[in-house]
Image (cartoon, grey):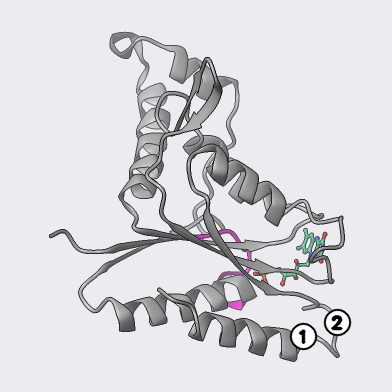
Amino acid sequence: MSKKSLLVVQSSILADNGQSNVLAQALIQRWQETHVDSEVKVRDLGAEPVAHFDAATLAALMSAEEERTPEQAAVLAQSSQLIAELQRADHLVIAAPMYNFAVPSQLKAWIDRVVANGITFKYTDQGPVGLLQNKPVTLLATRGGMYKDAGQDFQIPWLKQVLAFIGLTQVEVVYAEGLNMAQQREASLAAAQAQIAALDL
Ligand SMILES: Cc1cc2nc3c(=O)[nH]c(=O)nc-3n(C[C@H](O)[C@H](O)[C@H](O)COP(=O)(O)O)c2cc1C
């Protein structure tokens, strides 16, 4: 049997000071306690951003294999690598700060690469169908303010929508809210850590 595999996608720009990254580390530790002989792949989009999906990316996708420039081949190889990491994972973690009510552009760029027609979704006469094998997903949502269930959250509902589009519907969310509110911060982080400690991984 192949080893269990955890994919952790980080998107804070603050490296070890990013609270979503701190929570991701706690989850990795928990995962490694539960799955002793397993693989963990950290895809840190803050440290190594994926280029935005642009005209050159589209041209690379539309090109015939034998006519691709080295640059086009490299763009497609990176997309394939990102998709392979996602396909291989038994459990996906996305550590996502809220930036301007939504996700960081680094995370949006990753999503734009892994949502791939014919690979992770396809259209049928009945509409779109996700092609990824379903697997548990944990979202680690950090915010400066309080937006859970407030109707102004375009981060978690959007992530759930786009993940469902590619076939991932088993989503659990750990919120750490009010991190820029002095009275709230420590209690929120402690509650998020406690939720991670109790996750059924
Ligand atoms: C560019 C930027 C935009 C932000 N926008 C929001 C926002 O819309 N709502 C909010 O609650 N916090 C916002 N914040 C605060 C972050 O969500 C908060 O600092 C969080 O801890 C960041 O996650 P991290 O610590 O994992 O990097 C923003 C921070 C930055 C840097």
Q: Which residue is mark 2?
A: 181
The vertical placement of 134 against 12, above or below, is above
Position of 45 with respect to 108 (left or right) is left
Which residue shows up at 58% across the image and 88% down it?
194
Q: Residue 185: which disc? A: 1
Label 2 beta carbon less than 8 Å to ligand 1: no
Q: Which residues are magenta?
A: 8-18
Which residue shows up at 50% across the image and 15% down it?
59
Was residue 6 drawn as part of the magenta stretch in this picture? no
Badge 2 vs badge 1, beta-carbon distance below 8 Å: yes
Ligand 1's quadrant is: bottom right
In the orientation shown, which residue stands out farthest toward the front? Answer: 126
Counting from the top left corner in percent of width and height, residue 84 is at: 33, 43
**In this orientation, which residue lies closer to the viewer: 48 or 121?**
121
Q: Residue 32: which disc? A: none
Q: Amino acid at mark 2?
A: Met
Q: Residues within 10 Å of mark 1 (few under 14, many from 20)?
A: some
Q: Is residue 18 visible?
A: no
The vertical placement of 31 against 173, above or below, is below
The vertical placement of 118 against 38, above or below, is above
